[in-house]
Image: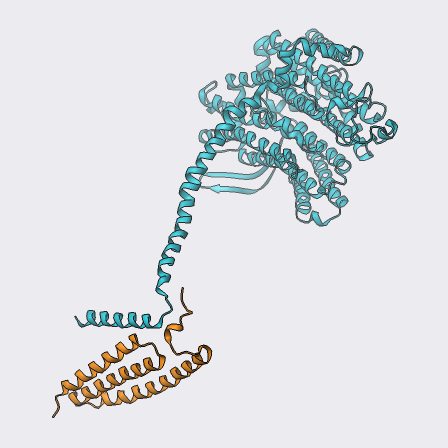
Chain colours: A cyan, B orange
Amino acid sequence: MSPLILMPLFPLLGFLVNGLAGHRLPARAAGAIGVGAALAAFAAAIGAVRSLLLLPLGDEARVLEAFLGDWIVAGDFTSSLGFRLDPLSAVMVLVVTGVGFLIHVYSLGYMRGDGGEWRFFAYLNLFLVAMLTLVLADNLLLLFLGWEGVGLCSYLLIGFWYTRTAPPDAGLKAFIVNRVGDFGFLIGVLLLWVAFGTLDLGEILARAPRELEPGGALVSSIALLLFLGATGKSAQIPLHVWLPDAMEGPTPVSALIHAATMVTAGVYLVARAHVLYLMAPLALGVVAAIGLATLVMAATVALTQNDIKRVLAYSTISQLGYMFLACGLGAFSAAIFHLMTHAFFKALLFLGAGSVIHALGGEQDLRRMGGLARRLPITHLTFVTGALALAGVFPLAGFFSKDAILVAAWVGRGPIIWGVGLAGAFLTAFYMFRLVVLAFYGASRQVHAANRSASRAANHAHVHESPPSMAGVLVLLAILSAGAGWVGTDLIAGGNRLGSFLAPVFAGGEHIALTEAHGHPTRALELSLAAISLAVGVAGILFSLIAYRWRPGLAAALRRGLAPLHTLFSHKYYFDEFYGRVLVRPLFGLAALAFRWVDVGVIDRLVNGAGESVRAAAQSLRLLQSGYVRRYALVFALGVAIILGLVGR
Amino acid sequence: MIAPEAFLYLAAVLFAVGLVGVVVRREAIIIFMCIELMLNAVNLTFVAFSRLLGSIDGQVIVFFSLAVAAAEVVVGLAIIVAIFRERATTDVDQINLLKF
């Protein structure tokens, strides 16, 4: 069987086994099934990519296909269960299954003792199925199936601890906000079908340049609508509000779904449909603008958050903004490069945060951490590696991928956009190392619930490093975060391997977008821009060390001095309040009205009325049964008389 | 001879008396007697018509009717005895538990 089919098949089996029988299995078995399925998926992915690489290079992108059969056949319309692997989906698939497998392993340690391991691993496996379907689908309807599937798993996993009130609410918020995006997505798909009569991606992308009017209303609308879907799934303005709340879910979920994979589906969609976007400069501009705006907004908010996972959540939103900025500049392979490196170091950071939370017995507030560097050495070291990678410090992975985007910004749009991206990089380094300092350095600010008088040593003894299943994954991801950057840069011999691997997919589109504006970047320009972004990153790190470690008063002074800004940022630009006032409350009011007028007024009246009328009729009819035999006899006699009278006529 | 209509009038009167008795009287045995009266009125009618039409059918039906009346009396009296054992009364107005 084709490895393309095996890839989603193994996790599907894992989901079925754990889902149907998992509650009867011991927890370790459920975990083993989940991890085994993920490992099998990863092995299948490697096999598939190997087969792809063995195909001869040509002008067109290399493609592996597998066809399971027709799914929907209705008149002219056919949607098939077809999978297609090309270099773009190959990168995605390796990231999804590779990081997914590592996170499954981490979950063995993190979720131990929870009691719901079978549900957890079942949902995680199902997520892999849906994500792989999304990435491998050869037609938009199947892609949408995966799209919805990952949304479902996100909802299930965010609300995993459903006995508490916050997680189910957060899951619901995520699903509903996503739905708004999905609305746009579906309209876009509908327009595509109307225009092309098919939803096969390969066909649409091949026919689009000839059949659609470049820059026209149709292609722009389609691109914008698909992008609306992408903003929902990838948490960009205006549909980003669900991601910080999604941190209610277990940390492995935050790492896998809300950092490495699901949120990247939007980027994948835009990259996959790059042909459409390159034909619609308006849409491309919108993508870049929103990416840029989100990048800055999320970075400023991340500066002020006190929950370790919220900082990382806003960081994810910000980095996704970078990816969309790259797409909007036409630099699609830079976006995918950053997607890949971000998956590594953001997953690392989240899992490291999970390690910290696990060690502190559930504490997530940065103001109550500190002094963990000595007690959690592996976590500390790997976390700093991830932070350095995110901040874009040479030679770690983030440096190369972020730099690629910044270069594209300079070349494609000029120094202003580049400057904003650079400012974002400074903020990224700053908030990231603020987090590192607050969590790991300085004296311990831990608050202990009981036993104030008991020795601090005894209390601190509870803080322990994570078990090997967790620590090992951290180390592996740290290695990847450190070394993965070299595949995407052309500063070393061999050139931009990732770029040339992906190039056939984007078929020269990138060069069109980039060179149209300012021509190819020279080596000197590239190196100077790289040096500047490195300097800015380091400056951000130094500034945070000064403000939070060496001159702690500085941070407080800044907060006071910039108080209005600080309030704006810490309230997340009041997006939630705005949506609450403008959308949620009116909707609830409308729902209440509908309930009173329709549900109660009409339907309940009808149903209850039917019962009520029967009851009333019965109430009057029962009076006939008086129990008096003589009255029955009288009625009998009268009835006979009447009938005889009628018959006699 | 006696006009055949006279028998019919008599039968009608007997029937009416029996009917009224069933409706008006309270004692179970009296009601039974009135029912018998109605049955016999009908028998008289049949015989009268048999004479009138010169056909033997009417008289044959009377035989059936008598047999049915007898059987009915057996069952009915048994019921009344059973009720009397329970309630120590034959007043049908007291037998009114099957009400709303």
**Left or right of B29 in this view: A199:** right
In the rendered image, which quarter is residue A626 located in? Answer: bottom left
**Left or right of A610 in this view: A468:** right
Residue nearest the observer in this picture, A135 or B45? B45
Give coordinates of residue A323: x percent, y percent. 63, 20
Residue visible at 27% across and 88% down in the picture: B62
Residue nearest the observer in this picture, A157 or A44? A157
Residue visible at 42% across and 69% down in the picture: B97
Give coordinates of residue A635: x percent, y percent. 29, 69
Please identify the quadrant where the N terminus of chain A is shown: top right
Give coordinates of residue A409: x percent, y percent. 62, 12
In the rendered image, which quarter is residue B12 located in? Answer: bottom left
Residue nearest the observer in this picture, A192 or B11? B11
- Pick out the residue farthest to the bottom: B1
Please identify the quadrant where the C terminus of chain A is shown: bottom left
- Pick out the residue farthest to the front: B88
Residue B5 vertical position relative to residue A565 in the rendered view, above or below: below
**Left or right of A380 in this view: A85:** left
Residue A388 vertical position relative to residue A21 in the rendered view, above or below: above
How many numbered circles does the render carry? Answer: 0
Q: From where the camera sits, is residue A56 visible?
A: no
Q: From where the camera sits, is residue A172 visible?
A: yes
Give coordinates of residue A440: x percent, y percent. 80, 21
Residue A307 vertical position relative to residue A167 in the rendered view, above or below: above
In the rendered image, which quarter is residue A265 located in? Answer: top right
